[in-house]
DNA sequence: CTGAAAGCGCTAACAG
DNA sequence: CTGTTAGCGCTTTCAG
């Protein structure tokens, strides 16, 4: 037990060897005689020595720290992705340094071996900033033509959500987006395509966008108060969907009778609130991104990896109350029984 | 736009000054002639230079990085605390380095200016590990006699929760703890004292503990299936309370009629699910902890700061269904109207 | 196998 | 005001 933190030189003196030998022992070099290694190890424990990470980083040029950029404060889905990231990175001996992607400006020069950007849709200036760090970058939750990425097919997901509503017999289907983040825009495209394929007229008045979750409530009221209100609604994220649900309740609309609501992401909250949604493997996406980054750090080529989405039917979707037996299939009932099943088209339905 | 990252020496050469002058400009020293400063700044932007954080850290002995230890994966309340931490630290120019407090062992020697431990109840060995880092430590969510801390009075909170149930007319009140984390144990003590003060018999069979949230469901079923089941239940955390709610629903018990449930923490989920709970300022606790740590880093004495808790009545508590007007006050009704009011005893009731 | 010495990029005296 | 220089603690040739 000593006061000031010991240095490698002190260990060397204590063990009566050179600092290089101590360094070799520290780094597991086989080129050290057993007896010498023992002497060094003894000295280390006697002095309570621990190598200084900063000095090592300066010397090797590698910090063993990964910067994780994320909009923590707005999206719960990000937290779940972060779990995967943290697990993989920590296990590999890397530190996780958090950055709020809102303030992307203040990325430190040096000090980071790589960057993991979660749910970031980088504009041209963002790309420059990322590049300025001079380290490998991997995107999680967003495809990119120049950057390595782990992502899902948001267009397919948007289509899946919309088709679920269509299958239940809905035709007036609204879309509430999140102010055109990359993912939200792609989900909207899937929505539009599903409508087109089903031959359902696309009413622009049913497509709304709310950058901030608060506005979603107002949008919902406006939607429900219109002359020809929607009977189904697809929200570009679970957070948005939950806001819609609250607004609908406040408006006196029953869910799913008056308004069927489907979200996107399958965050934990969705499970508790019984929200029907499009699930994507959140934690896995984070873990996958971390693994990809680690691989790139080892010299692997920057690849891209796509994960799959699936429909999760819970309690907020059902046929429109005006309908009688018009639905092709009662998804609601499927959602009610607690078993998990796979439909022949590969879409999982679970409660 | 240059390929390799420039160094201070290159900037110095480019600006035709010494490295010390560049360093002075970098650190905002006033002792630099304006014209010289301009030359340096020009060279810097011409070379796209950014100082190397690692080298600076090694030289100054301060890394401007704070380690944040937290059980991220088990408690949602931690995320909200983290928001406050991140806001304060980032604004002060510090990096946030995440550590899962489960694996407390792998704290790096050096590389961190300070440690912030969230919801950690450090045992003797943990204290040694924390001390081994050789930097100031601040605890968030846990009082400590040797360490600086930001915390609330969990005993008072537990008492508050129990008194709410007592006031509603409950006498068979169960407690579900979280396997005796520090906070949970203190909340239980508050529960016991409230019962004692009210002259209500304390039945040990009503006190259960579930380290893992999953078990809470089984505990709840056992509690409800007993010969003389509780009519009220106080869970040591919202997460636990939510699990209880699910189990109660599965059991066919109506809430709050058959079982009134109150949680603790007031996480976001609680708002969505209408859970009555004891609220504590989560984000503020994180921010407060960060500020305290920053102050200690500046040489301030290690102080302690206590935040207050308050009762938030929502929809999961009410009088036992057997009762008719026996309650001293109808908290349920108070919770129903959306205004926020302060009772004369300082307990806020809001919906 | 082992030790001496040269950096890694920056800051901070210390002289001018 | 400005330049020179000596470290910060560790890794890594390069000689023994």
Image (cartoon, coloured by chain):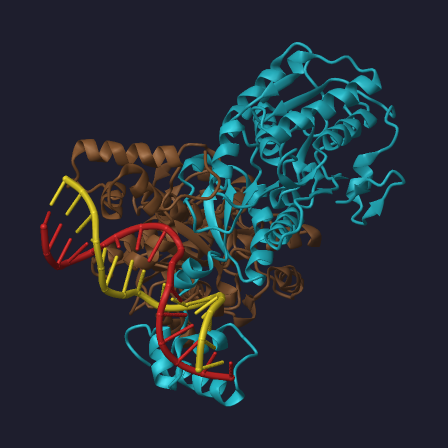
Chain colours: A cyan, B brown, C red, D yellow
Q: Nearer the viewer, residue B73 or A36?
A: A36
The image shows residue B254 at horizontal and vertical percentages of: 64, 48
The residue drawn where x is 41% and y is 66% is B189
The image shows residue A261 at horizontal and vertical percentages of: 68, 29
The image shows residue B242 at horizontal and vertical percentages of: 58, 51
Q: Is residue A17 above or below residue A64?
A: below
State which quadrant residue A329 falls in.
top right
Q: Is residue B334 above or below residue A285?
A: above
The image shows residue B148 at horizontal and vertical percentages of: 29, 62
Question: Is the C terminus of chain A in the top left, top right, bottom left or bottom right quadrant?
Answer: top right
State which quadrant residue B156 falls in.
bottom left
Horizontal side, residue B154 vs residue A81: left or right: left
The residue drawn where x is 28% and y is 73% is A4
Horizontal side, residue A339 vs residue A300: left or right: right
Question: Is the N terminus of chain A in the top left, top right, bottom left or bottom right quadrant?
Answer: bottom left
Q: Is residue B265 visible?
A: no
Residue closest to the far top: A227
Residue closest to the far bottom: A35
Q: Nearer the viewer, residue A334 or D14?
A: D14
Q: Looking at the image, how many numbered discs can be counted on the residues? A: 0
Q: Is residue B329 visible?
A: yes
Horizontal side, residue B164 vs residue B255: left or right: left
The residue drawn where x is 38% and y is 49% is B52
């Amino acid at each position: 037990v000593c006061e000031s933190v010991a240095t490698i030189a002190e260990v060397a003196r204590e063990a009566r060897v050179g600092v290089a030998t101590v360094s070799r022992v520290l780094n597991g070099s086989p080129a050290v005689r057993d007896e010498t290694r023992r002497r060094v190890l003894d000295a280390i424990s006697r002095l309570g020595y621990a190598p200084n990470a900063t000095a090592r980083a300066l010397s090797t040029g590698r910090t063993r720290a990964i910067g994780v950029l994320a909009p923590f404060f707005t999206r719960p889905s990000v937290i779940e992705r972060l779990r995967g990231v943290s697990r993989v990175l920590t296990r590999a001996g890397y530190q996780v340094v958090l950055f709020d992607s809102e303030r992307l400006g203040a990325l430190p020069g040096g000090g980071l071996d790589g960057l993991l950007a979660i749910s970031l849709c980088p504009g041209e200036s963002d790309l420059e900033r990322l590049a300025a760090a001079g380290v490998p970058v991997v995107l999680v939750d967003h495809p990119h033509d120049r950057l390595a990425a782990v992502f899902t097919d948001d267009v397919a997901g948007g289509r899946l959500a919309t088709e679920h509503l269509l299958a239940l017999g809905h035709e007036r289907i609204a879309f509430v987006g999140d102010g055109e983040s990359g993912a939200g825009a792609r989900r909207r495209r899937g929505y539009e395509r599903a409508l087109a394929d089903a031959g359902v007229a696309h009413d622009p008045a049913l497509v709304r966008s709310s950058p901030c979750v608060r506005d979603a409530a107002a949008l919902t009221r406006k939607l429900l108060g219109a002359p020809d209100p929607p009977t189904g609604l697809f929200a570009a994220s679970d957070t948005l969907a939950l806001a819609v649900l609250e607004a609908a309740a406040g408006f006196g609309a029953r869910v799913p009778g008056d308004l069927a609501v489907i979200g996107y992401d399958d965050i934990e909250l969705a499970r508790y609130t019984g929200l029907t949604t499009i699930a994507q493997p959140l934690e896995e996406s984070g873990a996958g991104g971390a693994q990809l980054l680690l691989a790139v750090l080892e010299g692997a080529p920057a690849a891209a990896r796509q994960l799959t989405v699936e429909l999760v039917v819970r309690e907020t979707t059902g046929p429109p109350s005006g309908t009688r037996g018009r639905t092709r299939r009662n998804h609601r009932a499927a959602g009610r029984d607690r078993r998990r099943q796979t439909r022949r088209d590969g879409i999982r339905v679970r409660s």
